[in-house]
Image (tube, grey):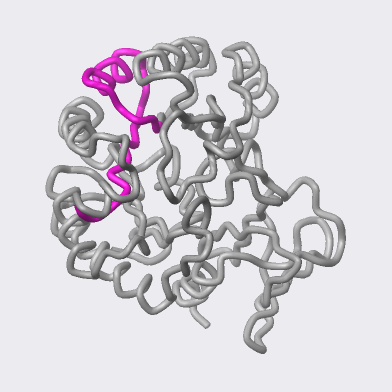
Amino acid sequence: MDWLNLKARLLAEGSIRLSGVEAPPYISSSAAGPGAGGSGSVFFSNGEGRVRLSLDPGSRIELVHLGAGKAVLYMEGQEIEGYLEPVALHCPRQAYLTLSGGCVYRCRYCEVPAINSARKTPEQIEAMVESVADRIDAISLTSGVLYDLQEEEDYVLEVVRRLKKFEIPLGVSIFPGINTAEKLSAGGVAEVKFNIEAATVKIFAGMCPDLDRDLVWKALQTAVPLFGRGHVFSNLIIGLGETDEEAEQCIRALCERGVIPVLRPLNPAGELKTWKRPSAKRLLRLFTIHGQALKDSGLDPGSAVSMCVSCTGCDLGPGRDAPL
């Protein structure tokens, strides 16, 4: 099975059961994004790409750790040899940190409000990055909104200021206010991700009733001249009820503005726990559409240095999992 099809099937399943030699250096936990609040995850690679898979003892797919990272994946009667990638903070080669673990907003697909973990102080963040600085290529920050947008932005900017001393490329993904892009650029941030989340206005309103989608679009448009085409990103969740045609329209609208979309398969969580993940076939269809839209707009995901576009563990990544 080629890598692209294997990864699509693994993303559609979403989890594995891990057995064999204990693997603490390879297990990651999340306070945000797919798998927030779960039992952890691992990053599996066969040398062609990587995929992040949640740990679930009831999963139909088994991953046997043979020791020292070497692993064998047992799936649909096949044995696929590969290895587990060691994580720095949350993912391989990055310090990817959630700053505020709680959020005042209540997006229906998100577990963060239910987890409501404590906010890390700037001093704690600095110490965490210091502990892995010799084995990372990027620092990536994301955050809930603990009190309000302005207070969160001020807090994130203070963290950014403290982390500049490491001279490591820094990416930031937060819900933007009116001048967020300008402030992050002035603070020395290399890349930003402002998430449009849903393919249509109607779906967004149903999933994130307290948020302003127009504010995200404005922030994205402002960000592209500041950070450069291909260094501004936006999550588009696949599986919220959108059609392929609606997804394509949103993908192309982002690409035409110089923004790289991140097609994030729905992780059934929050109020959507009973929903299904998108199928491998659908992920592959949209991967083709995504890749063509990037190519038509002259965007190269391979130039990204931080966050999800650089990692690709949770998504199919055109230009990384397969050539554009």
Residue 198 is covered by the magenta coloring: yes
Q: In the rendered view of the protein, which quadrant contains the C terminus?
A: bottom left
In the rendered structure, the answer to whether residue 303 lies left or right of residue 226 reads: right
Which quadrant holds residue 280? Answer: bottom left
Q: Position of residue 139 (x, y in %)?
A: 51, 29
**In the rendered structure, which segment of residues is drawn in magenta?**
173-200
Task: Please state the horizontal and vertical placement of residue 237, each as a whole percent of the image.
Answer: 36, 55
Q: Where 144 falls versus 33 (above or below)?
A: above
Residue 36 sits above or below residue 83 on the image: above
In the image, residue 208 sits, relative to residue 22, either above or below, namely above
Quarter holding residue 116: top right
| Residue 258 found in image quarter | top left
Residue at 63 percent of width and 24 percent of height: 118
Viewer-proximal residue among 322 and 43: 43
Q: Nearer the viewer, residue 253 or 318?
A: 253
Q: Say which residue appears at 40% left-offset and 33% top-offset.
A: 173
170 or 125, which is in the foreground? 125
Residue 23 in the image, given as x and y percentages of width and height: 80, 53
77 w.r.t. 116: above or below: below
Q: Main secondary structure of the magenta part?
A: loop
Does the magenta portion include 41?
A: no
